Image: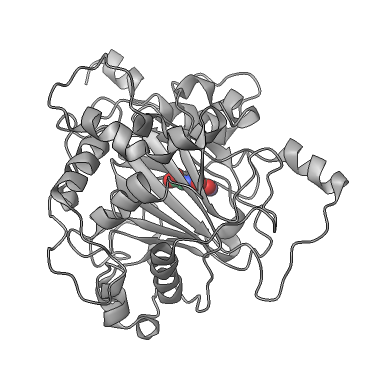
Amino acid sequence: MGKMAAAIGSIATLAAEPGEDAFRKLFRFYRQCRPGSTDLGGVIDFSAVPPACGTEPAAHKVIRSQLSVSSVSEHDAHRAGLQPVSKWRAYGLEGYPGFIFIPNPFLPGYQWHWVKQCLKLYCQKPNICNLDKHMTKEETHNLWEQSKEFLRSKDVNKRRPRSLLEKLRWVTLGYHYNWDSKQYSADHYTPFPSDLAFLSEQVAAACGFQGFRAEAGILNYYRLDSTLGIHVDRSELDHSKPLLSFSFGQSAIFLLGGLKRDEAPTAMFMHSGDIMVMSGFSRLLNHAVPRVLPSPESASLPHCLETLLPAQLPSDTVVEPCSEEDLQVCTAYLRTARVNMTVRQVLAPDQDFPPESAGEHKRDIATQGSCHPDDNSDQVKRARLDPHS
Ligand code: OGA
Ligand code: MN
């Protein structure tokens, strides 16, 4: 490797900005990295962990994590589009108790259901999305219909205006997260999608959290240049419940840091179908997504998405058939995009929202980052201050 190439690929050579902490420095490093010329050997790839991990030189202290196989019947797993839990692999990281990483446990083809729901259904009313700020209900009502011809057209005219789907950044479900107040509230709730609630309950149960209730969701839609700034998800009132994260489409780098914002994070890949669970000690850790990785062959799909959803589905599954047209639109979209669904339980079983306290509320605004992907990677900071851009 020549001197220049080595310089491009090294974290040490990235000059720190004045007052910059270890997390921020690594965030910038991965944001600007070029797969191919940057050495990403330090990024954990849970999909590539050999079955007998632990006997390997433990560079990253990846450990096996136990699942509760008997908590989810094979039938219910199948209904949610998942392999039997006995076939899942689950990993943890030394130093991060409560963090569980499950490399793609979906049945072949079943990820398409969840992708289609994110692009076609969940972004519709009564759910809330970033486009609501600038558009009427009628305009946002049919993002899918408005965008599908654009996306399906073979003419790859890069200079055409972006379709509405390509401008979609986030959707909130259930108790709608308020990006300004950083709070959920009792009177800002719409029914949580029952299929996603079912999927979440199965995954939570497999991780030892029986009785998990999917009460709020944030869906993040990433283009190849989107990032998600450093933040902690602390707005939920019951932190004893896990936070679930589902990734689809292009791979990304995830940074998992410490309780304090400046602690150096651990970097890992998130691939299509991967599920992450943040619970216990790891529930309130700082984290970020500095980089979505373009597919190695330009604008191609990950291999696990090459399988179609079976035409014949079990009668009581929550997964719905995917038409040829649905698949074409989802495929075109995901060639240059990533979708992430996070699901949260907000309240403990008998808990109510407390009466508003103005003082606490203000302090929260000053100390928390927002959590939705920003389109322009140079403007992570601004986006944290102005999440509706
Ligand atoms: C979030 C979050 C991670 C991701 O929405 O709070 O951390 O991969 N998402 O999008
Ligand atoms: Mn988060």
In the foreground, 85 or 236: 236
Residue at x 17%, y 21% (from the top left corner):
156
Q: Is residue 339 visible?
A: yes
Quadrant for residue 18, please give it: top right
Task: Name the quarter where the C terminus is drawn.
Answer: top right
Is 41 located above or below residue 78 in the figure? Answer: above
Q: Is residue 8 above or below residue 148?
A: above
* Camera-side residue of 170 and 253: 170
Give percent across and percent down for residue 279. Answer: 54, 64
Residue sitting at the far front = 138
At horizontal 30% and vertical 75% (from top left) the residue drawn is: 77
- Tally the numbered discs: 0
Q: Position of residue 107 (x, y in %)?
A: 21, 65
- Tell which of 100 and 389 is nearer to you: 389
Nearer to us in this view, 295 or 34? 295
- Coloring applied to the structure: one colour
